[in-house]
Image (cartoon, rainbow, N blue to C red):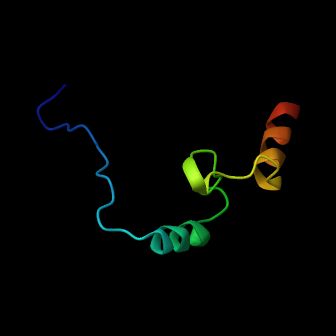
């Protein structure tokens, strides 16, 4: 790797509250908040229309 290139990384959030995270999730556009990446108690319901709809569209293509 050339000397001026760096490896990007993400640092975990520190000191964030669930309310703050939920507010950020609600403000993201639908494209960014597809919710496929969410895990744990905030994971999307398996019957969530937006996730199922996007999968159905990609299956038809």
Q: Which residue appears farthest toward the left when viewing the image?
A: 3
43 horizontally vs 19: left or right: right
- Residue 11 in picture, x, y percent from top left: 28, 51
For residue 61, say whether it is visible.
no
Q: Residue at x 50, y 74 (%)?
A: 19
Above or below, comparing residue 12 to residue 23 in the picture? above
Of 61 and 34, which appears nearest the observer?
34
Q: Residue at x 84, y 41 (%)?
A: 57
Of 35 and 15, which appears nearest the observer?
15
Q: Which residue appears farthest toward the front when viewing the image?
A: 41
For residue 52, say whether it is visible.
yes
Above or below, comparing residue 27 to residue 5 in the picture? below
Q: Residue at x 65, y 56 (%)?
A: 31
What is the number of callouts on the image?
0
Quadrant of the snapshot with the C terminus: top right
Above or below, comparing residue 19 to residue 57 in the picture? below
Quadrant of the snapshot with the N terminus: top left
Above or below, comparing residue 35 to residue 22 in the picture? above
- Residue 60 in picture, x, y percent from top left: 88, 33
47 horizontally vs 25: left or right: right
- Residue 53 in picture, x, y percent from top left: 83, 48
46 horizontally vs 5: left or right: right
- Residue 34 in picture, x, y percent from top left: 65, 52
Q: Which residue appears farthest toward the top when viewing the image?
A: 1
């Amino acid at each position: 790797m050339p000397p001026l290139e760096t490896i990007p990384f993400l640092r975990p959030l520190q000191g964030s509250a669930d309310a703050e995270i939920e507010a950020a999730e609600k403000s993201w556009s639908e494209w960014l908040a597809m919710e496929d990446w969410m895990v744990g108690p905030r994971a999307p319901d398996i019957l969530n229309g937006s996730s199922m709809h996007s999968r159905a569209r990609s299956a038809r293509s």
